[in-house]
Image (cartoon, grey):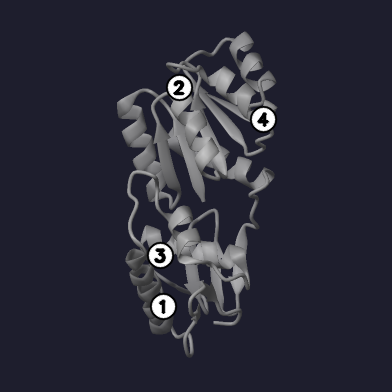
Amino acid sequence: MRLLLVEDDKLINQLLAEALSNQHYVVDVAADGQAGWDFVKSFDYDLILIDVMLPKMDGISLCRQLRTQGYQMPVLMLTARDATEDRVNGLDAGADDYVIKPYKLQELSARIRALLRRGGSSLPPAMKCGNLSLDVNTREVTYKGCPLRLTPKEYRLLELFMRSGSKVLSRSAILENLWSFDEPPDEDAVKALVKRLRQKLKLAGSPGDPIETAYGVGYRLKQNP
């Protein structure tokens, strides 16, 4: 899943983006409200985290602009301002949740998962494809009940495949969903990532080739790997 973090504090940007990436999210970072708006117009996001006090365009204005322009993804406001009036303003602007700084990462992560479940990108707690299971909340993957150790990128690719069902995903679609704006690779990186995931699924016991290649089009997970 792809998240946008709009926060002007460089240290918070770095720490929070790293923590969310370790939870297998793809995270883009914007340092001001206008940059956040430009990101939204360029990419599809499952959720946006917005600081209230931002240069160029404050968080309340950005959230209000998102809603007036028809964007429906969940928005979580982050701020050190804890007055009731501030929370009301954020929620009235269209935010779905409001978290006061300093916050515990564990609680913030739980709120993100809750918003993703409620929003248009909601997923079932667990997804299954044949003998393969993926738990969205714990980020655990098993094959016939045995844990499957995946890197964050491999996990994101498998989740993307399972979310997409029988749909063939092009390399460009995989690039857009799995790599952030700051780390754009070429399509050879997609081929290498698919190869690594394919090998791990085979080692886990999946018969044949668990990932189907549609030549000239892309890839999809076989429905009974």
Assess disc 1: are there few (<14), some (14-19) or many (≥20) residues with their C-alpha within 10 Å of its C-alpha: many
Assess disc 3: are there few (<14), some (14-19) or many (≥20) residues with their C-alpha within 10 Å of its C-alpha: many
Q: Nearer the viewer, mark 2 or mark 4?
A: 4
Q: Going from the N terminus, do you reach mark 2 or mark 3 first?
A: 2
Alpha-carbon distance for marks 3 and 4? Answer: 34 Å
Q: Quadrant of residue 171?
A: bottom left
Circle number at residue 198: 1
Q: Going from the N terminus, do you reach mark 3 or mark 1 first?
A: 3
> Label 2 is placed on what type of residue?
Lys
Q: Going from the N terminus, do you reach mark 1 or mark 4 first?
A: 4
Q: Which residue is mark 2?
A: 101
- In-image side of 225 versus 91 (left or right): left
Considering every residue shown, the one lying at the far bottom of the view is: 208
> Label 3 is placed on what type of residue?
Glu
Q: Nearer the viewer, mark 1 or mark 2?
A: 1
Q: Which residue is mark 4?
A: 69
Res 103 visible: no
**Mark 1 residue element:** helix
Q: Residue, x 68% and y 44% (percent of image)?
A: 118
**Mark 3 residue element:** helix
Q: Which residue is mark 3?
A: 154
Residue nearest the observer in this picture, 185 or 116: 185
> Label 4 is placed on what type of residue?
Gln
**Mark 2 residue element:** loop
Alpha-carbon distance for marks 2 and 3? Answer: 32 Å
Circle number at residue 185: none
Q: Tell me where residue 178 appears, x and y as whole percent.
A: 44, 55
Q: Nearer the viewer, mark 2 or mark 3?
A: 3
